[in-house]
Amino acid sequence: MKQPIVTIVGRPNVGKSTFFNRLLKKRDAIVHNQPGVTRDRHYAISDWNGKSFMLVDTGGYMPASDELFDTAVREQVEIAIDESDIILFMVDLTTGITDIDEQIAEKLQRADRPVLLLVNKVDTDARESEGYTFYRLGLGDPLMVSAIQGRGIGDMLDILVANFDKAQAEPPDDDAIKLAVIGKENVGKSSFVNTLVGKDRVIVTPVPGTTRDPIDTPLKYNKSNYLLIDTAGLKRRARVQENVLFYSQLRTMRSLQRADVVLCFIDASKGITRQDMHVVSDAAQAKKAAVIAVNKWDLIEKDHKTVREWELDLREKLGENQYIPIIFTSVLQKQRLYKLLDLATFIHEEYHKKIRTSDLNKALLPIIQENSPPAVRGKEIKINYITQLKTAAPVFGFFGNRPELIPINYRRFLEHQIRNFWGFKGVPVTIVFKSKRKERDRN
């Protein structure tokens, strides 16, 4: 199932970013361990009672000019209505209803998305009665919360996840392999789609942010069906530059949610940028299979060392995402485009691969016995049983006596062993440790 996209909207200084961090249970909301990826984004995966969702904070996409604030807020609300599944509209109890609040509410009343009205800064029970004045916005029952203190957050999250079933669902696809084509503007995404299908299904322009509707393009190749999900362009040109980035990231997240395999395009002529690494880490965070396509390779002066040097540089920046393969392409020269499609098809098979429990235990238990987890505070840790819990993306369960004491470096060791035996090229592998008692109780 795709994770719903939940976007927090509201005018500046109502507490959106504080609320965002509260839901992520940490002050520094976005943490990346990949080199070159800084903590400057305003979206992350959160969960409540086992239901995960992509949470977006619009507070980080604000212009420096005071004169542009109201325009930026209205644009962000319009983008959220188009691209989000559920909208959290935050207002401020201490200031009451403002003109911009009323303008936002008027837009949200016409939205075909579930909207929850959050009255922030309700720090005491005594102030709750003041919040009912926000009924006047016409968006149903106001939910009283305090982002700083955490008051009302649990009740709000219960209501939020109850609305997930009401969120607009993607129509079911047939047996097509869904490939999301993502990357920066003008990296060659739309040209790649057009070249494969042999016609201009997606309008190509050198102007970033040009008004274009994205198009899902069906493709048949080697008796397999594909759906190419292009992340091109804005429906309308944003007037505030920060909102171009906001829209681009929302659209990329939606494409990620729908995909089986993500094709991460990088512009070789521009080099490897921080935004490129953002795109790759987004795919990894969403637990999607991925391949990196270094496009416009025809523009690079090359010798026998060039490919190797590029690969080394990319591998260093990928950090823990070393499993993602790299291919060098030129859409203009039609170089290795079908090799990219073949690689994506293979990775799709890897993404859905299921390893038999008997094979897992036969291969891994002897290695675990020879390289057991280190004892913690004198307590010996044993792993007795292994099984694959799910596919797409694969999750492996390791059952033992003290799962909470197993260190992160041992988790990486086990992932490395799984990849040594069964590959999972281009596929994120998740390892969980569970109590063997719980496994027996379940059986």
Image: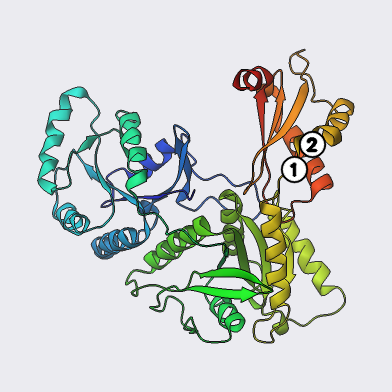
- Point out the tag, 1 or 2, that comes first from the N-terminus: 1
150 vs 84: above or below: above
Image spot of residue 314 (x, y percent): 72, 62
Depth check: give the residue in front, 179 or 243: 179
Q: In this view, does 301 lie to the left or right of 287?
A: right
| Horizontal side of residue 43 vs 289, given as left or right | left
Residue 116 visible in rendering:
yes
Left or right position of 260 against 172 = right
Which residue is labeled 1 in the image? Answer: 355
> Cα distance, mark 1 to mark 2?
7 Å
Question: In the depicted view, which residue is nearer to us: 426 or 359?
Answer: 359
The reply, left or right, for residue 86 in relation to residue 220 is left
- State whether residue 61 is above or below residue 386: below
> Mark 1 belongs to which amino acid?
Ile
Residue at the spot 80% in from the left edge and 34% down from the top edge: 358
The percent coordinates of residue 176 (x first, y second) are 57, 65
SS at badge 2? helix
Note whether 205 is above or below 61 in the view shown.
below
> Is residue 147 something that shows in the picture?
no
Q: Which amino acid does label 2 sit on?
A: Leu
Q: Is residue 279 above or below residue 133?
A: below
Q: Using the rendered view, name the quadrant where residue 224 is placed.
A: bottom right
- Residue 355: give x, y in percent of width and height: 75, 43
Quadrant where the image shows the C terminus: top right
Residue ID at (28%, 54%):
113
Q: Where is residue 3 in the image (x, y as percent from the top left)?
A: 46, 48
- Where residue 360 is drawn, which disc sits there? 2
Q: In which quarter of the image is residue 119?
A: top left
